[in-house]
Amino acid sequence: HNSSLTPSTETGTTPSAREPHACNSLAGTISAQALSEAREWWERAADDGDNAAMMELGLLAHGDGESALAREWWERAAEGGNAPAMGMLGLTLQEQGDLERAKHWYARGAAAGNAAGMNNLALICEAEGDNASAKLWFERAAASGLPEALGSLTWTALLSGHPERGCDYFERFATACFGPVEQWDQAMTSSWANANVFSNDALNRLATGGSPSRALDTWALTAKTGHSDSLLFPIVLSIQQGDQARASSLRAHLTFADIEQMREDMASARDDAVTGSWARDWFTDCLRVVGVKDPT
């Protein structure tokens, strides 16, 4: 399902599909030995109005914990037309709770071709319930070279009744982010965000007639990251298969807090899924498992 909007940093984090994202930069890869000299060059270039240098100086300040200075550099670079700086300024504003201004800068960055801005704008649209706009921006981000956006599209494809597209998005996402299929098991247990995309893929594959045992194997791994849906979905599948004993055994491991959160998440997913779709029926069954006896 959807994750919360937790801003990510710029410098070399593991790709995740449900977090705000900004482009990579030289400041994230330069050696410590050369950093002091590079800073001097960037400061000189910034004095001459070089927006790219301002962007880099913002990253250095951010890395040093000087958030006010970082924002100042990114504001100067963004006002000068630097698209990556627009994305970082938007990310900073979002972290500070100024969502409207963050959207403004994400949109300006997106208009300038910044894939990170497109992706982050999509995440905000999704959180606000504007799924059509979210899908549009995720697609544009993916087309602009941001593979993480493909991971987000696995979810929108499921809800819109096109799980076969979700399977395709996932294959492209996983190949771009994690490499050969032999490395995917390790990837799905490396973070909650990665586990979320693999769990969504398991749903898309079930919806297209895929193997239930493969889905159960996936959820057994993704649950290790604390992905609570991966505890719920095997229960639903067990009930659908008529295995009440296994369902009861699995349900005994759910805590009250788990169930309360699942009710909220599954209701949101059910409401977002198109009427008559496999996803709508699945999330209705999920709600029954967590105590909503007659979901409407």
Image (cartoon, rainbow, N blue to C red):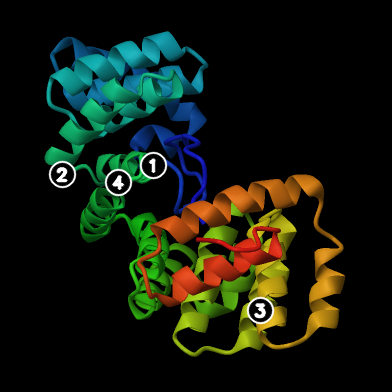
Q: Depth check: 215 or 20 in front?
A: 215
Dot 3: few (<14), some (14–19), or many (≥20) neighbours within 10 Å?
many
Q: Position of residue 7 (x, y in %)?
A: 46, 34
Residue at 80 percent of width and 48 percent of height: 256
Residue corresponding to mark 3: 237
Numbered label attached to residue 130: 4
Q: Can residue 90 be seen in the rendering of this structure?
A: yes
Dot 4: few (<14), some (14–19), or many (≥20) neighbours within 10 Å?
some
**In the structure shown, which secondary structural element does the residue marked by tag 2 occupy?**
loop
First in sequence, mark 3 or 4: give its number: 4
The answer to the question of whether label 2 and label 1 lie on touching residues, with beta carbons closer than 8 A, is no
First in sequence, mark 3 or 1: give its number: 1
Residue corresponding to mark 1: 21
Amino acid under label 2? Gly
Which marked residue is nearer to the observer: mark 3 or mark 1?
3
Q: Please, is residue 218 above or below residue 103 in the view? A: below
Q: Can residue 23 be seen in the rendering of this structure?
A: no
The answer to the question of whether label 1 and label 4 lie on touching residues, with beta carbons closer than 8 A, is no
Residue at 40 percent of width and 57 percent of height: 272
Amino acid under label 4? Asp
Residue at 46 percent of width and 69 percent of height: 280
**What is the C-alpha distance between the residues marked 3 and 1?**
34 Å
Amino acid under label 3? Leu
**In the structure shown, which secondary structural element does the residue marked by tag 4 occupy?**
loop
First in sequence, mark 1 or 4: give its number: 1
Q: Position of residue 154 (x, y in %)?
A: 40, 66
First in sequence, mark 2 or 1: give its number: 1
